[in-house]
Image: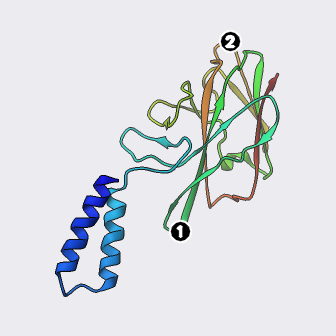
Amino acid sequence: MKKFLASFALTFTFINCSNEKNSDDLTNLLLLNALSTSSSVNTECGYRSNTGPLSAAGKFEVNRTLRTIDKWESTRNGGSEIQGVVLIFTGVASTDRVRFVYSGTDLNDYGAGERKSTSTSCPFSLSTMVQGANTLGMTRDNSVSNRWLYNASGTTPSQFSMLIVRDNFDDLSKTLSVIVENQ
């Protein structure tokens, strides 16, 4: 905040001293300056790569009740919108499975369960994730296109996280539910 205020004062002083700038230029410069000095994203969990900025993603703790994921958080870039959520799993046994139920027709739209991590801390790190359906000792059954099952095994960790991302090319009004249950 101090960095922004100092930058704001310097920009305002510079623009105020010039009689050739109009109010539109002042507004544009202040907005540009605010965007370039801002380094934080308001997010419950988020996700990032090693070098990339933090992107918004909600945090949803999965339990043994089938519940609709309601913690999506959005990042907007021009006309596109990207929504993300990090699912946190704890207490998963080798005899359990994760079940996703989608209100649309094809879960391939979201790739639910294809980005996993053994870490349950936020933000979700893309650089340490394992990518693929059959990872972390889990095997996917996607024989029904809108209901995917991930069966755990003896090598599945008892706690892990999954990142799910969707965008406005998908139907954002569709719902996705998840549960941990016995196989």
Return the x and y of residue 74 as percentages of the image width and height: 57, 55
In the picture, residue 67 is in which quadrant? Answer: top right
**Cα distance in 3D space between marks 2 and 1:** 45 Å
Return the x and y of residue 61 as percentages of the image width and height: 68, 34
Residue at 78% from the left image edge and 53% from the top image edge? 104
Above-or-below relation of 58 to 169: above
Direction top: furthest residue: 154
Residue at 46% from the left image edge and 30% from the top image edge? 128
Q: Earlier in the sequence, mark 2 or mark 1?
A: 1
Q: Secondary structure at mark 1?
A: loop
Above-or-below relation of 136 to 131: above
Q: Which residue, given by chain and number where applicable, does mark 1 sit on?
A: 79
Q: How many marks?
A: 2
Residue at 77% from the left image edge and 16% from the top image edge? 95
Above-or-below relation of 71 to 137: below
Q: Residues within 10 Å of mark 2 (few under 14, many from 20)?
A: few
Q: Secondary structure at mark 2?
A: loop
Return the x and y of residue 23 as percentages of the image width and height: 32, 84
Q: Residues within 10 Å of mark 1 (few under 14, many from 20)?
A: few
Q: Which residue, given by chain and number where applicable, does mark 2 sit on?
A: 154
The residue mark sitting in front, 2 or 1, is: 1
- Residue 174 is tagged as none
Left or right? Give the position of 99 relative to 123.
Answer: right
Return the x and y of residue 65 as percentages of the image width and height: 82, 33
Instruction: Name which residue type carries label 1.
Output: Gly
Asked if residue 93 can be seen in this view, the reply is yes
Q: Give whichever of 93, 41 is nearer the camera.
A: 41
In the picture, residue 27 is in which quadrant? Answer: bottom left
